[in-house]
Image (cartoon, helix red, strand yellow):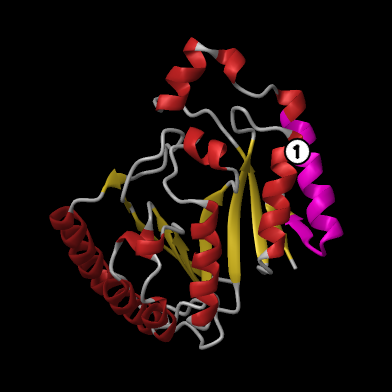
Amino acid sequence: MRGIYVHLPFCPYICPYCDFAKWRVDADAARTYLEALEVELEMTPSAQAQTLFLGGGTPNTYSTAQIAGLTKRLRAHFSLPDDGEATMEANPDRELCRGLELVRSAGINRLSFGVQSFERSELQTLGRRHSPEDVVAAVEAGRAAGFSNISLDLMFGIPGQSVASWRRSLDAAISLGVEHISAYGLTIEAGTPYARWFEREPSGFIDETTEAELYAVAIEVLGEAGFEQYEISNFAR
């Protein structure tokens, strides 16, 4: 199976734990990047692909019209079948989840929301700006736009996280009726603000034994809810 991955590296803000290739969004730079991507696409031989994934960064930093235009060109260039899975990663911020109908009509049929936690204190620790209520609204917006395949990313090992708070996040994600949940352990990456924090105050971070316990809780809770673990961090109904 051939899958196409397209990286859209701009974010409305930069999370302190992230070491992906990303930049805080600048309108001119984001437009130039998209233009360069389209030129590169024209130089790429046409091929048959089965899946498409728009990752980042935060792809929905771009307007829905820009995403829709890019998606249509990618689907045509790579002859993606009508039922081929086409995913867009997205932040669940309310202002970034408007107009999802246009993205859906262009051929994106799966959304992957970067939630990380449903606990306000943990979201603040992670530098995330959305609220638990924003996540609910984002999933509802996705459903209203016609998406029948939605994934939520969650994170364990967050400083200050407990087994109880992790269970609450898992339960909240399950209650939204999504089709897929990813559960990732926090990794301290060199060069990030979190790495500098860890150097100053390692005791502020969760130890490996507790992190392993949190991972086991995810497997247990998601399994009981009907999710099948098919990869280290991924669970699908």
Q: Position of residue 50 (x, y in %)?
A: 53, 77
Q: Is residue 65 left or right of residue 141?
A: left
Q: Is residue 162 left or right of residue 24?
A: right
For this rendering, which residue is in front, 117 or 217? 117
For this rendering, which residue is in front, 85 or 180? 180
- Vertically, is 135 above or below 202? below
Residue 47 in sight in this render? yes
- The kind of residue on which mark 1 rests is Ala
**Magenta includes 226?**
yes
Residue shown at 29% from the left, 64% from the top: 62
Magenta highlight: main SS? helix
Could you tell me which secondary element the residue under label 1 belongs to? helix
The residue positioned farthest toward the left in the image shown:
28
The C terminus lies in quadrant = bottom right
Q: Position of residue 203 (x, y in %)?
A: 61, 14
Q: Is residue 204 left or right of residue 55?
A: right
For this rendering, which residue is in front, 38 or 173? 173
**Magenta includes 218?**
yes
Q: Which residue is mark 1?
A: 164
Range of the magenta residues?
211-230
Residue 51 in sight in this render? no
Residue shown at 27% from the left, 72% from the top: 66
Q: Position of residue 121 (x, y in %)?
A: 55, 36
Q: Is residue 200 left or right of residue 36?
A: right
Residue shown at 60% from the left, 74% from the top: 149
Q: Position of residue 83 (x, y in %)?
A: 56, 86
The N terminus lies in quadrant = bottom right
- Vertically, is 41 above or below 161? below
CA neighbours of label 1 inside 10 A, class few (<14), some (14 to 19), many (20+)? few
- Vertically, is 159 above or below 108? above
